[in-house]
């Protein structure tokens, strides 16, 4: 069957199919061009925003990584790391460091070992085994439900005495091993009134003449001679002896002197500042291109010209050289003070002579700009770790308890791991880890910004869920959806228009064909009438 569209023009003799196509195109083409232009502009905005977001993220994270790596602040050094290793405590200001150490004895834990138990799954005897430590006494009850070596291990580990029990197996069966934390004060005993062939096999008392358990290792403190002064510590990780330095004792070496020194990061800081200036200028170039104005003839221009989000980013970044980054009393507080200046075109430049002069005059002050200080208001609350994601600011530590360990940090309950308090991931203090060394109810932790923190604050403000960059990205995403909807509506309207034209021209064709048929009939009749005359 022939369609109306394919038979258009049959009656009239006109190419009405081509006419419908041209009329439809005349309506569609301008609308299609307008939508295509919107798509091109929106795509350019999406690309430019992605470049801006990527640029600020890369700029901030690369600097944060550099700062966190420790290469931009003074690091302690040990003349023999096989005996003692040294590292900087987060936020410490080491400055000049010169000290001597002699490690006469390492700290060690008390370890008790039982005789071999041939059948480790068999009954060991029921009763009560009392654990006595510096923290008090703890009863371990063995009944029908846990009457086995594994049951005893589990009961000791869950007693809360601070002891670690395990079973060491060999071809002769298994032996119970019980271990304390390191330090002379961590000595413990295990006593019972149970029979010697039952739980009595696991008894030990230092004051007794004979014991069923064998002391494989006696508890002892580390003995350190620091600059000629003998001191003891209960662990082999010592953070309260040399100011700002964490010592990891590796082995005892009586009579051997280890020298501690410090390595200044002058060259690394110069390189970091140079890289900072280069990265800043690259980011500015990306933003300038995205916001370029149109030419005098109306052509060109950046896809984000006039965009509030990018203007805000440019404004925030332009303040970096004059932003107070923290520092130390009497030292430089801004990048401008160490030679970073803003040119007339908004780019940065580095006066290396000024930087080198400042490094020579006040190395601690320059270093402090990159190594933000973290300090506690209480000597009993120590900062043991601080990740790069911890926002600069002042954080209240309240409701501190030591038994059990707990606290609230920046308004959020702290997580507890061993003897550490960890700030909640939901808190702005996330990444902060503290150690409580005594009875204290509250403290205040202060974290300076430093250049990494200042840049991170700008990025977070721009990239936040309600920040200008997020708002701009939401706007272009919405526009993408609107363009797609408008295209669908345009296609529907054009199709309807084409259908109406086809119908109208089809009706016209039919009527013209009828008129022609009538004309032909009349012409025939007139010819007949004429011939008849």
Image (tube, grey):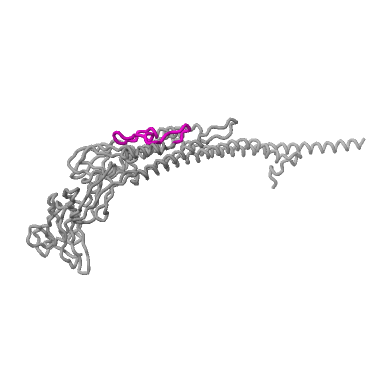
**31, above or below 126, in the image:** above
Report the side of 383 relative to 509 (left or right): left
> Can you name the residue that lies furthest to the top here?
296
**387, above or below 296, in the image:** below
Report the side of 68 relative to 122 (left or right): right
Point out the stretch of residues depicted in magenta: 321-348
Q: Measured from the top left, where is residue 405 in percent x and y?
A: 21, 44
Overall secondary structure of the magenta stretch?
loop
Q: Measured from the top left, where is residue 513 in percent x and y?
A: 76, 39
**393, above or below 158, in the image:** above
Instruction: Tell me which residue sits at (26%, 56%) in the image.
Output: 82
Q: Is residue 124 visible?
A: yes
Q: Quadrant of residue 356?
A: top left
261 and 119: which is toward the camera: 261
Q: Measured from the top left, where is residue 393 in percent x and y?
A: 31, 36
Q: Measured from the top left, where is residue 248 in percent x and y?
A: 24, 51
User: Which quarter of the rendering shows the C terminus?
Assistant: top right
Residue 220 sits inside the magenta stretch: no
Residue 341 sits inside the magenta stretch: yes
Q: Quadrant of residue 67?
A: top left
> Can you name the residue that lies furthest to the bottom here?
171
> Can you name the residue that lies furthest to the right here?
533
Q: How many marks?
A: 0
514 and 123: which is toward the camera: 123
Q: Is residue 155 visible?
A: no
């Amino acid at each position: 069957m022939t369609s109306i569209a394919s038979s258009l023009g049959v009656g009239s003799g006109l190419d009405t199919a081509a006419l419908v196509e041209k009329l439809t195109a005349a309506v569609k083409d301008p609308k299609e061009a307008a939508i295509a232009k919107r798509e091109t502009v929106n795509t350019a905005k999406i690309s430019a925003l992605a470049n801006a977001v990527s640029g600020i993220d890369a700029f901030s994270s690369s600097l944060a990584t550099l700062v966190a790596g420790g290469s931009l602040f003074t690091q302690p050094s040990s003349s023999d790391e096989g005996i003692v290793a040294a590292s900087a405590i987060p936020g410490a200001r080491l400055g000049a460091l010169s000290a001597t150490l002699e490690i006469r004895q390492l700290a060690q834990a008390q370890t008790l070992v039982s005789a071999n138990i041939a059948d480790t799954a068999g009954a060991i005897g029921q009763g009560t085994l009392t654990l006595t430590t510096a923290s008090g006494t703890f009863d371990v009850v063995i009944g029908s439900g846990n009457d086995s070596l594994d049951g005893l291990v589990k009961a000791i580990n869950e007693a809360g005495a601070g002891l670690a029990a395990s079973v060491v197996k060999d071809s002769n069966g298994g032996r119970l091993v019980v271990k304390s934390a390191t330090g002379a004060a961590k000595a413990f005993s295990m006593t019972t009134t149970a029979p010697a062939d039952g739980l009595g096999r696991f008894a030990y008392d230092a004051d007794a003449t004979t014991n069923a358990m064998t002391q494989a290792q006696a508890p002892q403190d580390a003995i350190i001679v620091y600059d000629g002064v003998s001191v003891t510590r209960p662990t082999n990780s010592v953070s309260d002896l040399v100011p700002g330095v964490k010592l990891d004792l590796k082995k005892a070496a009586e009579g051997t002197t280890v020298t501690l020194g410090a390595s200044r990061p002058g060259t690394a800081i110069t390189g970091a500042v140079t890289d900072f200036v280069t990265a800043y200028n690259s980011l500015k170039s990306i933003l300038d291109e995205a916001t370029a104005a149109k030419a005098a003839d109306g052509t060109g221009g950046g896809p984000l010209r006039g965009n509030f989000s990018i203007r805000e980013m440019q404004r925030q970044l332009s303040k970096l050289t004059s932003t107070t980054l923290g520092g130390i009393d009497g030292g430089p507080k801004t990048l401008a003070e160490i030679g970073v200046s803003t040119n007339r075109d908004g780019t940065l430049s580095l006066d290396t002579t000024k930087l080198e002069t400042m490094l020579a005059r006040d190395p601690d002050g320059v270093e402090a700009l990159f190594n933000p200080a973290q300090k506690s208001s209480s000597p009993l609350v120590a900062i043991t770790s601080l990740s790069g994601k911890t926002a600069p600011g002042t954080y209240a530590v309240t409701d501190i308890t030591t038994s059990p360990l707990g606290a609230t940090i920046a308004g959020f309950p702290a997580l507890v791991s061993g003897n550490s308090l960890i700030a909640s991931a939901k808190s702005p203090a996330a990444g902060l880890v503290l150690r409580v060394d005594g009875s204290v109810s509250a403290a205040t932790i202060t974290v300076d910004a430093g250049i990494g923190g200042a840049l991170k604050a700008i990025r977070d403000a721009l990239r936040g869920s309600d920040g200008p960059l997020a708002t701009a990205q939401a706007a272009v995403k919405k526009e993408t959806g609107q363009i797609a909807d408008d295209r669908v509506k345009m296609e529907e309207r054009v199709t309807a228009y084409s259908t109406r034209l086809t119908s109208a021209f089809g009706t016209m064709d039919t009527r013209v064909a009828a008129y022609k048929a009538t004309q032909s009939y009349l012409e025939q009749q007139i010819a007949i009438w004429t011939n008849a005359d």
